[in-house]
Amino acid sequence: MSGPVLAGGASDKDVLHRFGYAQQLLRDMGGFSNFAISFSIISILTGAVTLYGVGLNAGGPVVMGIGWPLVTFFVLFVAAAMAELASAIPTSGALYHWASFLGGPAWGWLTAWLNLIGLIAAIAGIDYGCAQFLTPLLGLPETPANFTVVFGVLLLSHAVLNHIGIRTVARLNDFSAWYHVAGVAIVVLALAFFAPKQPVAYLFTKTFTMVTDKPYWFAFLGGLLQAQWTYTGYDASAHTIEETKNARVSAPWGIYLSVAVSGFFGYIMLAFVTLAIKDLGATAAEANPFIYIFEQALGSTFGRVVLWIVTLAMWFCGLSCVTSTSRMIFAFARDRGMPLSARWAHVSKRWRTPAAAVWLAAALSFFLPCLILGLVALFPRRLDFSKLYPAVTGISTIGLYLSYGIPLMLKLRAGRRGLWTERANGPWNLGNWSVPVNVVAVIWIAFITVLFVLPPNELTGSVFAGTLVVLLAFYFLCVRGRFRGPLRQAKSQDDLLMLEQELEK
Amino acid sequence: MIFTERYGLIIGIALLLSVSISAYLLARQASRNVERFREDRHESFLGGRKP
């Protein structure tokens, strides 16, 4: 491990200085806000509504009753392993920095791009999905042009809020965390009091599948993607670590608890919704089974209320995604890992935010669906937007999980070679449990990466393989030897302090 | 399918218990180590070294 080993007695700023970085961003987030940003990105309300059909059609109620806790179990290991690294290397580059320190610049560069691709595709997926929900709710015709305009307005709102400060975004995220809990409470209480209920055993024993050409266990595995797609983006707590007070403890808890709390509330919600199913076959055949269950159980008005609740949850989710992505761009550009790095690493003096990185994140996210729409318009017979778009957004999960997996794998390797010792750990660590937890996390990530590209998601696999080939070709042709990984911003502590004073003028 | 219908309830409850227990144990382990780190290095985290 080539990063600094952190001795005790260090404040947040001291720690950052030891990594060679100045405190450029405003460190104003408390532990709850750090948790809230990841909790908002996981967004159980968004995941439940947009992905419920995936699970139900693949394996029926058993996917909710058994599949959700099964995935939660393993994702907790991934989160705990990531939390340890966040505590040891508390910089905004997060996964990219961890991989660089543990495996060198090549691993760092690959991790950075996988993470960035995942994050940008996630913003595009969430905000375009939000636009698809919001457009009809506003009474506008559901056309690609209207979706794109609404999508652009949503992105603009996220970029403006992220530009004007982490304080505003943190307040909104705090509200978002309570909003998600309240949203789940409304859904659960309404169904508990007013909807007819199946027996509890229905959740654990009722199998059903729309997959006719494969055995049930295979279909069930496909259904696990519902939970796995929901559990993404909790690296946000690590990306905002330079803006979090008591960072080496608060941010790891943010990562871990966002998964644990989402697992708990997500399960309660999915259980009540599934137990309110009247006709399983008819529900599975609907375009949005989650909303259909509400309409059947509580009437169309309540179904519309749920749609509004979820649409706002998606907006909060997109807002946090832009925060996370912009910090990743900022950190990578600070180390000159991107074209025009100096521009993207610029920090606004007035707001103390990586303003240029915020707008780049929004612009790239807007560009992605526009590119796909353009390609579909050019080749209408060959390409279908409804198939291609989920495939492209599907790569967000693969990109994110591979970027989570690489540093965990490198940490295991460094431990085996004696390069990562107990002294390198941060305060939030698992002690003797660290290695087994990391092993389980890496195995799970390898397993789900295969699962992500199995039928019917082969197109996602092809798009991702293409992206990976382009990335590797770019690295070997243009980057190798030039990119050196994390760079100190100044030679001495005094120079770092001067950099900070310039921003405070 | 028959397997799930017969043993699903037991599997489900066992799984829920496993998730809850492992989530708690991981959190407790981390929490203890944070405390140990704090004591070993006399650190308050918020403001550097404890007086």
Image (cartoon, grey):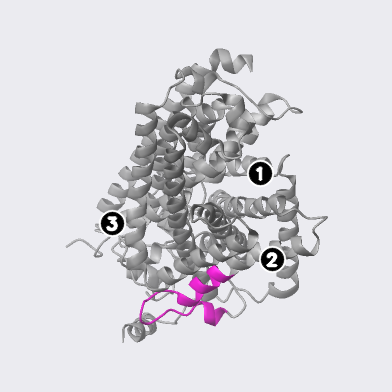
Above/below status of A134 relative to A288: below
- The structure residue drawn at horizontal position 74% and vertical position 49%, both measured from the top left corner, is A459
User: Quarter holding the C terminus of chain A?
Assistant: bottom left
Asked if the residue under mark 2 is in contact with the one under mark 3, i.e. CB atoms within 8 Å, the reply is no
Q: Nearer the viewer, mark 3 or mark 2?
A: 2
- How much space separates mark 3 and mark 2, taking CA atoms? 53 Å
- How much space separates mark 2 and mark 1, taking CA atoms? 23 Å
Q: Nearer the viewer, mark 1 or mark 3?
A: 1
Q: Amino acid at mark 3?
A: Arg
- The structure residue drawn at horizontal position 60% and vertical position 59%, both measured from the top left corner, is A121
Q: Amino acid at mark 1?
A: Phe
Q: Where does the image place residue A49, in percent across and percent down from the top left?
A: 51, 42
Residue stretch in magenta: A341-363
Q: Residues within 10 Å of mark 2 (few under 14, many from 20)?
A: few
Considering every residue shown, the one lying at the far left of the view is B51
| Apparent side of residue A449 relative to residue A470 in the rendered image (left or right) | left
Q: Residues within 10 Å of mark 1 (few under 14, many from 20)?
A: many
| Apparent side of residue A371 relative to residue A248 in the rendered image (left or right) | right
In the image, B51 versus A268, the foreground residue is A268
Q: Which residue is mark 2?
A: A371
Q: Does the image show residue B11?
A: no
Q: Where does the image place residue A306, in percent across and percent down from the top left?
A: 43, 43
Q: Amino acid at mark 2?
A: Leu
Considering every residue shown, the one lying at the far right of the view is A381
Please tell me which of labels 2 and 1 falls first in the chain.
2
- The structure residue drawn at horizontal position 33% and vertical position 39%, both measured from the top left corner, is B28
Q: Which residue is mark 3?
A: B41
- How much space separates mark 1 and mark 3, taking CA atoms? 44 Å
